[in-house]
Image (spheres, grey):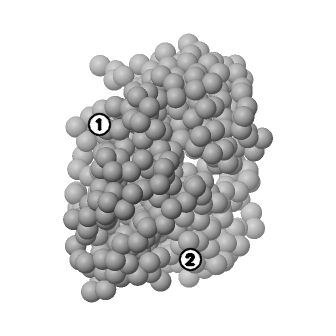
Amino acid sequence: MPDRTHRALQKAEQLRLSGIGAAEVFGFQRRLDESQWFAPEKLAAFQLVQLKALVRFAATSVEAYRGLDAARVEAAATLAEALAAIPILPRDRLAKAPDAFHPPGLPTGHTLSGSRSSSGTSGQVVRVDTTNVAFAWQNALTFRTQLWAGRDFSKAFAAIRVGRTGAPYPEGISTDSWDAPTAIPVRTGPGYFLSTNASLEQQWEWLGRRGPDYLLTYPSILRAFAARARREGQGPCPLLGISSVGETVDADLRDDARRWLGADVFDIYSAEELGTLAIQCPECRRYHTQDEVAIVEVLDEAGRPAKAGATGRVVVTPLFNFASPLLRYDCGDIAERGAPCSCGRGLGVLNRILGRHRNIFRLADGTTFWPSFGAKSFSSFVSVRQHQFRQLSFNHLEVVLAVDAPVAPEHEASVRQTIRKRMPAPMEISFRYVDEIPREPGGKYQEFVCLIP
């Protein structure tokens, strides 16, 4: 019996736009609609074939892979054997010598279609070229995301994101569709777009004026909106659904969004230089890796595949970008591997995406942990619009707050006590108050940053 995502695709077919581009996206989507149900072994066999083709090309055409043992990869009988023959690519190697990853020519059918740059939230900006084939697959994943989220394409959609050139406050950009036909190949309701250069106050006002049904933005913006909605008793406008990108989503944010903004958060895990890596399962809050397009590994400290429930570094091999082949690229993220999903999809599972390496709290004895400072409970002491925690040294945590009113000493003491209860070791805690915490160049916002070299 067809699942609801298949029925959503069938319904979308009735709204399909004319033209070659829309037809191509639907062609990709039909393949994805079938492949999501493949057994993991069948998906791995497909990945192995594509990986071998990518390695053959990279070993002969890309300077950075001149020493790669392509013969060993070619002889591999399993995906695990092939991956074991490929060394992990550190992010800083790509950042320091991007031209070494650009081939002088491309395989037949592949053409250069532009470049993509990371946001620099890891401390390093990386840049890759991309091809028409890789771009087409990413468009197909954009469409899959909307289908999995169960969106009604006739409704109004709004996005608040960085890089929306020509979308400043107060008007932003208004269009008659959610995206280009090559990404959303159906007739849709109106689309509204605003740059993150607008202040939180301006974003709130703009949303109230536009009144969209769906909103796509960063988790930190959603958190600020939820906090304001809690104070005011209502959000900027009624919402049917929320999509989040670019930052980590935790249980507190999901609960706050549902309670104060009136809609569930549907999260997408992506990286600018890699594209979409995992999409939230339509049946649960976990994530499915997009195995048709990329090999997403989660590796433990010994470099072995992490077991279900364990965390590790995320290593990615995009399978279709021959313009900048990235073989086992350590993207700088940490994630928790999950067990197979009850929905029946053969796609890999991530329980959580925890963030960047520099989002890990470090102690002098080498101990590390993922911090949770109880920020949600601050609202009972302080009216906080934004917050950021910065580890300045092994024993010093700086709390940066954007607040609506001066904070009384006794309330500051309450916040300090809340944080200390969650710390595994004694810590100096200082406060710094600002009007607004700026976003990083890529538009992302880190709620915790470790600044220890």
Residue at 67% from the left image edge and 48% from the top image edge = 197
User: Among all residues in the image, which is located at the extreme right?
Assistant: 166
| Residue 8, position as x, y percentages in the image | 45, 21
Which residue position is annotated with label 2?
92
Residue 429 in view of the camera: yes
Which numbered dot is residue 68? none
| Residue 59, position as x, y percentages in the image | 59, 73
Along the viewing direction, whichever of 128 and 57 lies nearer the viewer = 128
Residue 182 in view of the camera: no
Which residue position is annotated with label 1?
284
How much space separates mark 1 and mark 2, taking CA atoms?
35 Å
Residue at 56% from the left image edge and 16% from the top image edge = 154
| Residue 295, position as x, y percentages in the image | 43, 56
Judged left or right of residue 284, residue 111 is right
Q: Residue 233 sits in which quadrant?
A: top left
Q: Amino acid at mark 1?
A: Cys
Residue at 33% from the left image edge and 57% from the top image edge = 411
Query: Around disc 2, counting alpha carbons within 10 Å, would you say few (fewer than 14), some (14 to 19), or many (20 or more)?
Result: some
User: Among all residues in the image, which is located at the extreme bottom?
Assistant: 365
The local secondary structure at tag 1 comes to: loop
| Residue 34, position as x, y percentages in the image | 41, 32
Q: Residue 184 sits in which quadrant?
A: top right
